[in-house]
Image: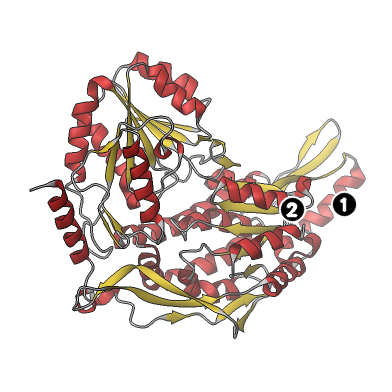
């Protein structure tokens, strides 16, 4: 069989993976499109009568004639500048320069609101999970994991805040000054999450921002909008009026307008550095703006000559192809020592051929349709660019595609000047570059614009140690004999260079969305009497010695 024949057969196989409508598992079907006509502004659900945008799934159904049609999931409001202004105004009223109900509530009361919200969305788990799966093509198992991990993150955040607040529930006396130091909110937070983890990554900024007493203007990700519809009532009823307001519409128009108002105190964005730069520049008072950013990455795997090949193959496949490689923490460049390259690549391609590709509700599926409709064209362009400069696709059928299904491609040898060498591909493309001198691999990480993570595979402690010391000054997580990843959520998640600003973890996020604030007075009898009256009389939610169980 020729390569052309194999390619054609694979295309036919990919086409056949798209089901006829009756073949979709009943529990996973979209029974009818969800046409959202409600927007949450200032604590009320407003009926939207304006322009809407249709939402189509990356999954297609196959007709009797073999034609493919993308499944219509519904539509959502295309709100504009007027609604963005209304959301900002509502947030301003709710915060009221720190005098509003939400920022002045006790920590225990804010925790109770977040717990109420969590209990409400748990009741909608199945619907939300199904929408994650259909909107972004994430496997059912991973969609369930995303929801459950988000709930775990919320509960861990609550537990961490209790510990933080209890630790601050005391007075300090230093050099004749008596003081209590706590954390207070920053103001209005503009929160935007990514489409690849539209719930989990969004909530890693949204929940700590809210629970620390900030008010939020929230712009859902471009893919993964409808999954928030089942949560609207929970947002409305669990939090005071105006504490959270949701804007839709064209992000390139609405979001810069919100930033240009100068009213946003914190920009919480998980997206691209280009967008982050533009939004920060749009803010007229840069010194008042705090940014909490999770941006792009080009994480490398460095495979040393003494690496355990089987372990390395397993971790690199998981690292480069989990959720089709659409993770900022994915391994996006493999640097392998020349002495082990042939053996590694042979086993790597063999294991890729065993991965199951199909629809996300299928059991054991690894590779699924891509949510970005133009992503396939971009990846084909990257392959053509690399092949035109001397690289080749190593695995049989690599790069074959039908609609949104793209069969993974291992491209080798990749070198400087090729798109795949520096650009973040964010998809099932695996560039591999050989090296002989370890300085070559180290220089790749040093010269990168990104500095999130790196993985080292090897067994020689001296060589691994010699890499750890310089690499921890280039990236923020060095993984030894395992893939790059974010979890566990209690660990710090950040990056250097263009990969991040601020640190996210259960512990760090609470601090990112708040600031240390203190009440102080001279240590005198009159001060003691005054403070006793305030504290024992429960007159202040900030100045207190309460202990939260």
At which x and y percent is residue 273?
A: 58, 45
Question: Is 395 left or right of 103, judged from the image as shown?
Answer: left
Q: Nearer the viewer, residue 287 or 240?
A: 287
Q: Which residue is mark 1?
A: 530
Q: Is residue 113 above or below residue 49?
A: above
Q: Which residue is mark 2?
A: 283
At which x and y percent is residue 165?
A: 64, 49
Q: Residue, x 68% and y 70% (percent of image)? A: 84
Q: Nearer the viewer, residue 510 or 111?
A: 510
Q: Residue, x 50% and y 72% (percent of image)? A: 231
Q: Is residue 111 above or below residue 505?
A: below
Image quadrant for the C terminus? bottom right
Q: Quadrant of residue 468?
A: top left
At which x and y percent is residue 235?
A: 57, 71
Question: Is 30 left or right of 281, judged from the image as shown?
Answer: left
Q: Secondary structure at mark 1?
A: helix
The 10 Å Cα crowd at callout 1, few under 14, some 14 to 19, many 20 or more, is few
């Amino acid at each position: 069989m020729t390569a052309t024949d194999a390619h054609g057969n694979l295309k036919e196989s990919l086409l056949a993976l798209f089901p006829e409508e009756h073949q979709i598992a009943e529990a996973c079907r979209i029974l009818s499109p969800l046409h959202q006509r409600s927007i949450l502004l200032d604590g009320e659900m407003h009926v939207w009568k304006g322009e809407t945008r249709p939402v189509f799934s990356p999954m297609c159904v196959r007709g009797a004639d073999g034609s493919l049609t993308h499944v219509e999931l519904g539509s959502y409001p295309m709100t504009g500048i007027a609604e963005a202004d209304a959301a900002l105004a509502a947030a301003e009223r709710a915060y009221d320069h720190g005098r509003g109900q939400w920022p002045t509530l006790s920590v225990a009361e804010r925790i109770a609101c977040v717990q109420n919200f969590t209990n409400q969305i748990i009741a909608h788990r199945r619907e939300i999970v199904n929408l994650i799966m259909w909107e972004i093509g994430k496997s059912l198992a991973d969609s369930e994991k995303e929801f459950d991990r988000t709930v775990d993150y919320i509960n861990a955040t609550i537990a961490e805040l209790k510990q933080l607040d209890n630790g601050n529930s005391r007075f300090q006396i230093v050099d004749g000054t008596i003081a209590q130091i706590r954390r207070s909110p920053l103001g209005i937070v503009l929160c935007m999450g990514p489409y690849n983890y539209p719930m989990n990554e969004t909530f890693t900024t949204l929940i700590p921002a809210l629970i620390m007493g900030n008010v939020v203007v929230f712009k859902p990700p471009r893919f993964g909008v409808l999954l928030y519809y089942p949560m609207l009532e929970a947002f409305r009823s669990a939090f005071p009026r105006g504490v959270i307001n949701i804007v839709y519409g064209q992000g390139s128009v609405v979001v810069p307008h919100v930033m240009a108002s100068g009213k946003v105190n914190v920009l919480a964005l998980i997206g691209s550095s280009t967008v982050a730069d533009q939004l920060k520049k749009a803010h007229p008072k840069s010194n008042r703006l705090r940014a909490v950013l999770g941006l792009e990455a080009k994480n490398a795997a460095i495979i040393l000559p003494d690496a355990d090949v089987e372990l390395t193959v397993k971790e690199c496949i998981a690292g480069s192809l989990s959720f089709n490689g659409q993770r900022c923490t994915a391994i996006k460049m493999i640097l392998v020592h020349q002495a082990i390259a042939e053996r590694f690549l042979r086993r790597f391609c063999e294991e890729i051929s065993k991965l199951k590709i199909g629809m996300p509700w299928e059991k054991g599926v690894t590779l699924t349709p891509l949510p970005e409709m133009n992503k396939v064209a971009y990846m084909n362009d990257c392959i053509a660019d690399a092949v035109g400069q001397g690289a080749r696709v190593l695995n049989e059928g690599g790069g074959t595609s039908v609609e949104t299904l793209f069969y993974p491609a291992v491209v080798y040898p990749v070198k400087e000047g090729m798109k795949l060498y520096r650009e973040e591909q964010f998809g099932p493309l695996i560039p591999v570059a050989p090296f002989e001198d370890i300085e070559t691999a180290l220089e790749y990480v040093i010269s990168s614009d990104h500095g999130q993570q790196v993985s080292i595979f090897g067994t020689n402690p001296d060589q691994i140690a010699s890499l750890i010391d310089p690499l921890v000054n280039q990236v923020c997580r060095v993984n030894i004999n395992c893939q790059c990843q974010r979890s566990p959520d209690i660990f710090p998640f950040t990056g250097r260079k263009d990969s991040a600003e601020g640190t996210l973890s259960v512990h760090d996020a609470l601090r990112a969305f708040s600031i240390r604030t203190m009440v102080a007075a001279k240590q005198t009898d009159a001060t003691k009497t005054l403070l006793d009256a305030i504290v024992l009389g429960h007159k202040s939610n900030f100045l207190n010695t309460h202990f939260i169980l």
